[in-house]
Every structure is written in structure tokens, then in C-alpha cells.
Image (cartoon, rainbow, N blue to C red):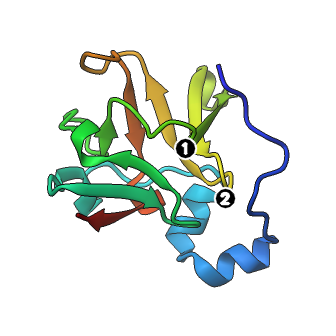
């Protein structure tokens, strides 16, 4: 597993993050929260384009890797190479693989082993952690 970096290319104070993120984005991306299922318009977005980090706009996923997981969160089977970092999340009495932006460290969601081929992975992302840029 790729582990998180202690320092990221983009580092800001909590006050600086609050200036550029909405309260919901801050809760999810900086405090490791989770948005409610089925609330993100990006869950059913299937236009061609790129999904970027809502905090630093680093490209994270392409529309070619998006699929309907039925979970209520935008899901992908493969990130753009080098775009994400991973760490162990032991909250909620379980162990999961947390996914974060490799450039700013913003919490994106979690990785699961129940996705489609060719990877078998499901990157279950919080929609508020993403911005969609159409092609």
C-alpha cells in the first residue's frame, strides 16, 4: 500500500483551507468526514472529462474509469497514476483503505476490493471532494 506523505506539495493552515473550501468540503477533505449517500450530482455524471481534487485541482480520475457502483457515491476503478495516496483508516470499528489527494492530502474517500475488471477496485469518492472538468 502506498502510504500518505507527512508533507504535501500544497500545505495550508486550517484557516487557509476554510477560505477556499465550503464548510462541507472542509469537513470531508480536512476532517475525514463523509457526505451523505446519493447527495452528489457527480454520482450520476457520465459526461466525458476529468475529475479533479476540489481543493487543489490535481487530476485524479478520468470518466473512462467511472462506473455506477450503486452505492450512492461517485465510483471509479482506477485513479490517474500518482494522483492519490493511501493510508489505513481504523474508524467506525473497521479497517479500510483511505484515499487522499497526493498533492494536498485532502481526504477523497476509500478503496474497496469489490470493483469491476480490469482492476477489481472500487474507489468510492465523496463528490464534494471532486470537481468535474468536461472534455
Q: Is residue 16 left or right of residue 125?
A: right
The residue closer to the viewer here, 47 or 99, is 47
The residue closer to the viewer here, 59 or 113, is 59
Residue at coordinates 40% horizontally, 16% vertically from top-left?
113
The picture places residue 96, in percent across and down from the top left corner, at 57, 24
The picture places residue 99, in percent across and down from the top left corner, at 56, 38
Quadrant location, the C terminus: bottom left
Question: What number is the disc on residue 44?
Answer: none
Residue 21 higher or lower than 52, as above or below: below
Which residue position holds label 1? 83
Q: Secondary structure at mark 1?
A: loop
Q: Secondary structure at mark 2?
A: loop
Question: What number is the disc on residue 30?
Answer: 2
Q: In the rendered image, which quarter is residue 122 located in?
A: top left
Residue 51 higher or lower than 6, as above or below: below
Quadrant location, the N terminus: top right
Residue 112 higher or lower than 43, as above or below: above
Amino acid at each position: 500500500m502506498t502510504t500518505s506523505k507527512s508533507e504535501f506539495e500544497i500545505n495550508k493552515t486550517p484557516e487557509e483551507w476554510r477560505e477556499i473550501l465550503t464548510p462541507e468540503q472542509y469537513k470531508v477533505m480536512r476532517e475525514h468526514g463523509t457526505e451523505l449517500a446519493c447527495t452528489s450530482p457527480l454520482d450520476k455524471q457520465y459526461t466525458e472529462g476529468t475529475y479533479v481534487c476540489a481543493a487543489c485541482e490535481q487530476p485524479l480520475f478520468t470518466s473512462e474509469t467511472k462506473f455506477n457502483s450503486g452505492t450512492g457515491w461517485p465510483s471509479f476503478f482506477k485513479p490517474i497514476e500518482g494522483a492519490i495516496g493511501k493510508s489505513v483508516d481504523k474508524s467506525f470499528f473497521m479497517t479500510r483503505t483511505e484515499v487522499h489527494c497526493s498533492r494536498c492530502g485532502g481526504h477523497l474517500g476509500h478503496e474497496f476490493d469489490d470493483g469491476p475488471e480490469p482492476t477489481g477496485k472500487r474507489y468510492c469518492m465523496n463528490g464534494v471532494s471532486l470537481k468535474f472538468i468536461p472534455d
